Amino acid sequence: MENPVSPSRLDAQFAFLTEADRLKSVLRATTLCDGSRRENSGEHSWHLALYALVLADQAGPGVQIDRVIRMLILHDLVEIDVGDVPIHSADGQAHGSAETQAAEARAADRIFGLLPDDQRDAFRALWDEFEAAETPDAVFAKSLDRVQPVMQNLASGGGSWASYNVTWDQLEQRVGGKIARGAPRLWNWVQARVRPWFG
């Protein structure tokens, strides 16, 4: 590892931090809770980190909330290059498609590649872990990533559900299963409040 105060290390770290600022310009389909405007991906990542901190008691055994928070801060940086691919859009298949995954992997290479090697490797490993959603930490992180937009839409009177004509079956299939996998009690609470919105 480079000297922690070497100019080249700091150059790389600040280059990454400056690039990360661009996430604030990536608009998502989901609005703020008050419906006043669309949320940006930087706000989404911050809000998810707060979700993890507040809802830590909903995590399963062995989940390390500090790792979950790190994953959530990093997980959407690839949207700087790829943009937000809404899960409920007309082109919803693009959300998890091989093409989107490949584009996001290229973005991860570029963006994390700005960092010093040790941080590049550590951050990329966390991003890969989140994407794979196989470890307890990543499964819980993914459940929070799915529940936050649900709560935003509920608070804003339908938000992107209304925009994309989302049905209850679509919500259960695209979102509910992921929430239930990582936080089953949370999904039970959420769906009782969301289900009436769909009539």
Image: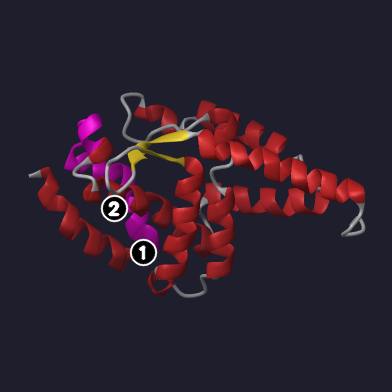
Residue 151's disc is 2
Q: Which residues are magenta?
A: 161-183
Q: Amino acid at mark 2?
A: Met
Q: Secondary structure at mark 1?
A: loop
117 lies left or right of 96? right
> In the image, residue 133 lies at what x, y percent?
50, 52
Question: In this rendering, does residue 115 appear at all?
Answer: no
Mark 1 or mark 2: which is in front? 2
> In the image, residue 194 lies at what x, y percent?
18, 52
Residue 136 is covered by the magenta coloring: no
43 lies left or right of 189? right
Q: Does the magenta stretch mainly form a helix, a strand or a loop?
A: helix
Residue 162 is covered by the magenta coloring: yes
126 lies left or right of 46? right
Badge 1 vs badge 2, beta-carbon distance below 8 Å: no
Question: What residue does disc 1 label?
Answer: 183
